[in-house]
Image (spheres, grey):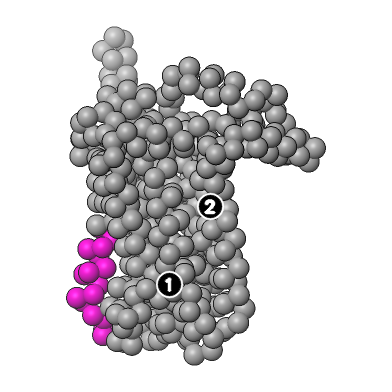
Amino acid sequence: MKDIKEYEKEYQEQQPEIKEPKKRKFGWLGMIFLLLIIGLGIYLMFRITDLLPGAKAEDLATLFKEINIKYLLISVGIAVLIPSLIVVEYAIVSHAVSGNVRPGILMKTTLLGKYYDYITPFSTGGQPMQIHYLHKHDYDGAHASAIILIRYSVNIVCWLIVGVTLMALGIHALSQIGDNASRIFLLIAGIVGITINLLLPVSVLIFVIAPRFANALTKFIVKVGMRLHIVKDPYKALKKAYKTVFDFRMCFRTIAKKPWHFIFLILVSIIEYFLTFALPFFVMKSLTTSLYWSQLIDVAGLNAFSTFAVSFIPTPGNAGGMEISSSLAFNAVAPGVAVYGVLIWRLFTYYIFIITGIVLTIRDVIKKAVISSRERKKEKNLEKNNG
């Protein structure tokens, strides 16, 4: 098998080719499956919560009658601000890479990425669709790929930094979880999730500081995969592994040449992920008066634990698993309202994109049916006139 230098030379000589991602043949079945997972997750969330000591959900009518509108509006504002910050991140990278910024295109790119990330396992569908979308709107292949991959590369590092920091600061909040099994699950699964998500940035670091060792380790892993019949084509597997590392490394090299853009991008990404982890605090504060500002980091830390705990679950958007893990975590600080807080929080950050996607899909189906019907009528009229 080739070594890393041969692959790097081959990789750098190639120009990125932008192809339209393959459309899913079973889109409707996939959507129905996703809705079933979400429904099952919500059902299990209520069932599990009812079994926890002192965590039975409060009366829904009373709860929403006493809701704090101020904090609910703050929650909505943060939910809108988060994707807006993502647009800013793409704008920073676009300006660094191509010298121009197109807010409308970048906003649609953000929403497109959110939707496809949320309907694909491990959030893998967003980037290919975003690259294709930018390429369709007059970004050349190199710029389209660089904008998406640079933002992704910097973001995954910031996500880990913010998440691990909040987990460290809020780890004492785990002790407030009355159920021992839930506490152990969140702690162990959270650490496992961090470890898995660290693999890519750590691999890049190893390739930078110890390329020979990294090359030997990658070949060893591929050979083990062959013996276990997981890897069928060693050349293809090795090439894919090297390409992933090179993409990640080249992205940092590119953005590092524009230090102010790089610093600004990191700052915006850190703010984005802090707000992402902290949002449930404001949602639950709108539902209960027993949650205090001093518990903001506790809630953000518990959210980080629950997020990393299910980050390796291969359901679209971690659906099902996220509802269960976060309700277990938030019951420690807001028993009785945690399940409703999770539903509202997930509505703001996840369900709304799925609902929007379904509405747009139905609209497209109806639009195609109407256009097809009109074309058939035109053909019939032409046949009558010719006849």
Q: In percent of the image, x 46 and y 37: which residue is there?
A: 248
Q: Amino acid at mark 1?
A: Leu
Q: Residues within 10 Å of mark 1 (few under 14, many from 20)?
A: some
Name the residue nearer the viewer: 224 or 29.
224
Outermost top residue: 386
Magenta-colored span? 63-80
The x, y position of residue 262, in whole percent, is: 30, 42
Is residue 72 highlighted in magenta?
Answer: yes
Q: Which residue is mark 1?
A: 169
Is residue 363 highlighted in magenta?
Answer: no
Name the residue nearer the viewer: 207 or 96.
207
* Mark nearer the viewer, 1 or 2: 1
The x, y position of residue 344, in whole percent, is: 35, 69
Q: Amino acid at mark 2?
A: Asn
Q: Residues within 10 Å of mark 2 (few under 14, many from 20)?
A: some
Q: Which residue is mark 2?
A: 197
Q: Earlier in the sequence, mark 1 or mark 2?
A: 1
Q: Is residue 176 above or below residue 6?
A: below
Regarding residue 303, the answer to whether it shows in the image is no
The x, y position of residue 310, in whole percent, is: 54, 61
